[in-house]
Amino acid sequence: MTAVDGGAAGAAPVTGQAVLEGRDVAVHYGGIKAVDGVDLTLETGRILGILGPNGSGKSTLLAALTRLVPLTRGRLTLDGADYGRTPPSRLAHRGIARTFQTVRLLPDLTVLGNVQLGADLRLGRGARLRELVRRSVPPAVQEAIERTGVGDLLDLRPGELSYGTARKVEIARALAGRPRVLMLDEPTAGMNQPERLEVAGLLRRLRDEGLTQLLVEHDVSMMVDTCDRLLAMNQGRPIAEGAPREVVRDPAVQEAYLGKRGHRAGDR
Ligand SMILES: Nc1ncnc2c1ncn2[C@@H]1O[C@H](COP(=O)(O)OP(=O)(O)O)[C@@H](O)[C@H]1O
Ligand SMILES: [Mg+2]
């Protein structure tokens, strides 16, 4: 079973086709140019990494791509069709899932309930009712739970989880809808090293099964090991793009990002 929806059953996913594109994407908050003229293409079965110091506009870019903030300028397309005015709730139905930089689990639901929400978002209400009638956990939810390794925690509530584990539940929730595009905003923040490696391995396996991903992370070696391409940003602007090893060696990236890695105080 692959994590990818939309292809012919059993067919190997075609890698490297443009699925989601942003052109000249800009989000300004008054005078603050949080994102200012970013071009990017997410290709099937590939991971695009976004690298940049705090405040460089990575989270705002994800918010723009998932329609949570309006574009000041630019164009968004999914499968070649403009989605610049599609409400964010509709994007889940079209197979776009994301995780947030800060944990956004519902505190009154169990781990299972939170993961199941991800499937409900994708399937809509009718399917939710059918699942309830059957009183069984849908296969996509079971698979998401297994793959993220949160199966022993299903009856706990988010407040009882470590931060790193809560992040894994967030990933499980995103996978439960069997997305075709997954965007992750610092998914391993707050995790220990074994957990980070586990998540990086999971993302690579999902990629190999054809899942298209956008990954924001500060861990440069994880980004180089995990991503097919990197886009580096500084102050809302793209400063380098290409093969991961080349991007991290780029003098502009070294200056903007690697030289400032101690500055994490403004993390949001
Ligand atoms: N809602 C907002 N209103 C005003 N400024 C914002 C808002 N969200 C983000 N910003 C500003 O936009 C810039 C980019 O922020 P962000 O996208 O969170 O960067 P990153 O994720 O790379 O750390 C920062 O200067 C931040 O303060
Ligand atoms: Mg951010």
Image (spheres, rainbow, N blue to C red):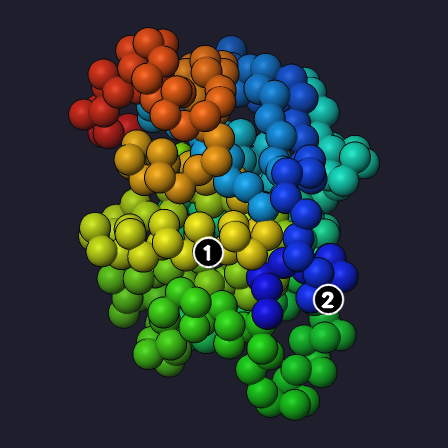
State the count of labels.
2
| Ligand 2 has an atom within 8 Å of the beta carbon of the residue at disc 1 | no
Q: Is residue 268 left or right of residue 63?
A: left
Quarter containing the C terminus: top left
Question: Between 57 and 249, which is closer to the camera in this rendering?
Answer: 249
Question: Between 98 and 125, which is closer to the camera in this rendering?
Answer: 98
Q: Is residue 235 above or below residue 266?
A: above
SS category of the residue bearing label 1: helix
Question: Between 107 and 175, which is closer to the camera in this rendering?
Answer: 175
Tell me the residue at 73%/39% (across/down): 78
Q: Is residue 99 above or below residue 228?
A: below
Which numbered disc flags the more N-terminal residue, 1 or 2?
2
Tell me the residue at 30%/62% (across/down): 165
Tell me the residue at 43%/67% (across/down): 147
Q: Is residue 180 above or below residue 1?
A: above
| Ligand 2 has an atom within 8 Å of the beta carbon of the residue at disc 2 | no
SS category of the residue bearing label 2: loop
Find residue 150 and report its image quarter: bottom left
The residue to which callout 1 is attached is: 205
Q: x, y (%) of residue 194?
A: 22, 56
